[in-house]
Image: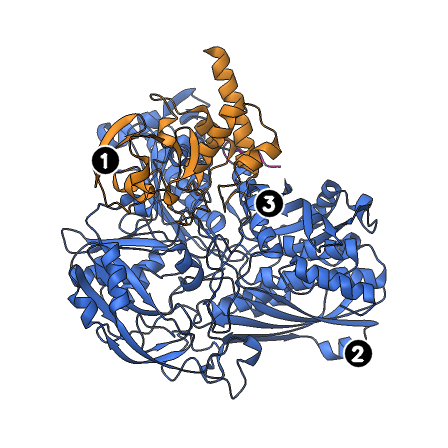
Chain colours: A orange, B blue
Amino acid sequence: MRGSFIVNGVVREWEFPEDMRLLDLLRREGYAEVKCGCREGMCGSCCVLLEEKIVNSCQILAATVMERDIRTVEALSEGEEPHPLITAFAEAGAVQCGFCTPGMVLAAYCLLKENPDPSEEEIKRALDGNYCRCTGYVKIIDAVQRGGRKMREKEVRE
Amino acid sequence: MKEFRQVGRSVTKTDAQGLALGRAKFTDDLLEGDELFCRILESPHAHAEILSFDASQAEALPGVVAVFHAGNVPRILYTSAGQGNPEPSPYDMVLFDNRVRFVGDRVALVVAETEDIAREACAKIQVEYKELPANFRAERARHPDTPKLHGDEAFMPIEELTYRPEENVASEVLLTIGDPDKAFEESDFVVEHTYSVHYASHAALEPHTAHARLDPQGRLVIHTSTQVPFHARRITAKVLDIPVGKIRVVKPRVGGGFGGKQEVLLEPLVGLATWRTKRPCRLTLSRKEVFTSARTRHPMRVRLKTGFLKDGTIKAMDMENLMTSGAYGPHAMTVLTVSAWKCLPLYNKVEHLRFTGHTVYTNTPVGGAYRGYGATQSHFATNQQLDIVARTCGVDLLELAKSLHIKEGETSPVFEALGEGKGGVTQILNSCKLSECIDRGAQAIGWYEKRDKKLREGDWVRGVGMAICMQGTGLPKIDLGSATMKMNEDGSFNLLVGATDIGTGSDTILAQIAAEVLGIDSEDIIVTSSDTDVTPFDVGAYASSTTYVSGGAVKRCAEAVRQQIAQAAGEILDVPQDELIFGECGEIRHPGKGKTVTFAQVAQYTLYGGTLRQIGATESFTGEVSPPPFTAQFADISVDCRTGRIKVHHLVTAIDCGQAINPTLAEGQVEGAVLNALGYALYEEYRFDEKGRVTNASFWDYKVPGPEDTPKITTILVDSYEKTGPYGAKSVSEVPMNGPGPAIANALFDAAGVRIFHLPLTPEKVLGALTKEKRGTPS
């Protein structure tokens, strides 16, 4: 079948099988930042934002999200400067293998938009759909707090 | 503390931003879209002979390009263990066999235009199996009536190693020091318990994956998610019977390994498919296949007998380890050996030791390397036993531990007696800050405020426990790391290493080591790692070797480069080179004449203006010793006496890893290992049905700790300096895997007075033990 998708603000027209998952379509079209860790809807590596909500793209049929706003981690950064949350993850040592990171960053972004200064418990709850096997989450939680601070500071400046 | 400029700084990981943006490429991100899809047909039986194999219907399916199986692929015996050459693991597998030995064993490989066609073709292959009796229990493996898994042709490539497939014995390791039997007789107390630890999955988030294509010269280029690119090249060449020089293995970013990718699983398959079809081919395991058909932690039964005096002095230890190899024997000897030599030297005051180790074949999933590598299994037993000794004698556990552990300037006969295939090496410890780890960890957990207090809150009762552990740092006289450096026009450097960054940050810390030697910023070191066509040889990321072994090579290499820079600078400034001082930011000074020259000017001089030559070097390093890192690990837990559930409040790790090259990255290694160990201690386990099938091969049913399962984790890097390591470094990433399990088990006893000898500590087991305890029967 054929349909149009709005990915990172750009309208794309694609031919795809009707049973294709959004994850596979995005990866086929070069959105390599969307990772496939389990295809079971558990690990969160394939997370994207669907109209501002975090979803596992492996659990969504592409055909069901045509014409809707889909964003990957690439959409967070504007221009050359990486998003403050990206910088925070790097600086905090929250990126080890990095396979979970794009999904984790999106989950953190969703939280911080609603709750700019979350507690540790709130962060753990918000990120619970995203597995990381490398970090023990300690530095990820630190990164989300740092990222929150950076985003608040940036907002004040603007 | 030594003074450093680059070492000891928490430099941001070189690839962190690229990874967070999703732009750094993993193996599957490098697919070009023209690859054929491979799919493995797996055995549904735990043990069976293949009577007939008919792929004609599959081959007739449009879009099927090839089907590989025992009938059309030569039988070449090998091991999938990515180890040195020859591997100290039995050659007991072929790519495709006429017999299957566990559910998930490989029967055939289908190559097709699409994934769907490959799947459909697998379903159309007709295989007639004759089921054979299967054995799922290690305890039964050596019994004469138990079916044998491997016949006449399997062999151990290193002849001195014991291998008795006729008894299902994949490895045997025996060691006696002193006279343990006499020492037991002379002991005031003798305690004997049987412990067991179980199957687990590494659960790296990136599944095993590889793809291959022929380059314009007809060479086989394999991109793969591996910890061992050079071993992958060698083993693939052997199995496919093509020269090593015809194969290039490239490791892109790797999405976690933990030992699971120290295995050459997919490279020979995509290699075979591409070599025979001449077309690019890809293969990625599903999560289910990763669980069932890749590698696991070896289950182990540890029977430990300890003889000790009334004051807690341990006179004798007798450890008998029975390890489940599963259907094949990768790492069968080495994991078993490590269960002794990376555990027992900790107790070097114990004069009388016996170790009896057997690894046995069973019709179950295949064990392999897994962070901790046998040491995890043994430390679970020794640390509960130590707690029992302290409690039996009524002595302070911490003081007992401090008095008996190995110290600086001391050795253990176990170091000399055991090694990975070549025998051990004598070593006297240069660094051991374990006593300080015990003190600082105890303070962080609030030991004396909580120990033996059984603080209650409703149904919950609280306790603390400790474990002391060691590991090694590389395999002495076996592991080789090497590095190549060259200088660029602007005074930056390319650093080419075979060392394999699998997310650990080794690219970053190796750059820091080189930068420290040259007195420049680590950002001026451009690291390329693990491309067998480009980078020099390295055994890869395993055995806690990278920082020490590969780091040692990088340090030597940078020193050689520095020497060449000094020579050129001396020529430029017309001064003797040994009077030059390397300042910061690539400036070289002659203090007497007040003259300076920059790295960029040296590069200009050597590349264009003066004595023309490329400044560069290649150096290698192999350890003469394997200095152990040490941890004291503490758990603060509560147990719900009504349900048996354990809640972990706080896990503390105080670690002596030598000088941390990058403290933030070192902490990250500890934190990841600690949470992995928590999952293993409490809930991660394989479940099987009566046919030997794994019944929970998915993230839905095999629980991996998520953010909400994470307790407070504290890491204390204790000041330490190992003089044989690069800038004082030892290893860090494996040793913290060993302690949380026994620390939690000891805390459970502290809280509730019940001891559980078999991991994981599930609510069912805890509740069962509590119920027995209440009834007054021994657990």
Asked if residue B432 can be seen in this view, the reply is no
Eye-nearest disc, 3 or 1: 1
Kindly identify the residue that appears in the image at 19 percent across and 65 percent down.
Answer: B66
- B7 part of magenta stretch: yes
Q: Residue B732 in the image: x percent, y percent?
A: 55, 48
Residue in the foreground of this view, choosing between B335 and B711? B711
Highlighted magenta segment, given as a residue range: B1-9
Q: Residue B769 in the image: x percent, y percent?
A: 74, 63
Q: Which residue is mark 3?
A: B709
Q: Residue B585 in the image: x percent, y percent?
A: 42, 26
Residue in the foreground of this view, choosing between B648 and A58? A58
Return the chain for callout 1: A
Residue in the foreground of this view, choosing between B703 and B400? B703
Eye-nearest disc, 1 or 2: 1
Q: Quadrant of the C terminus of chain B?
A: bottom right
Q: For mark 3, does the 10 Å Cα neighbourhood hold few (<14), some (14 to 19), or many (20 or more) residues?
A: some
Q: For mark 1, does the 10 Å Cα neighbourhood hold few (<14), some (14 to 19), or many (20 or more) residues?
A: some
**Spatial CA span between label 3 and label 1:** 41 Å
Return the chain for callout 2: B
Q: Is residue B691 left or right of residue B278?
A: right
On residue B185, the disc is 2
| Image-quadrant location for residue B777 | bottom right
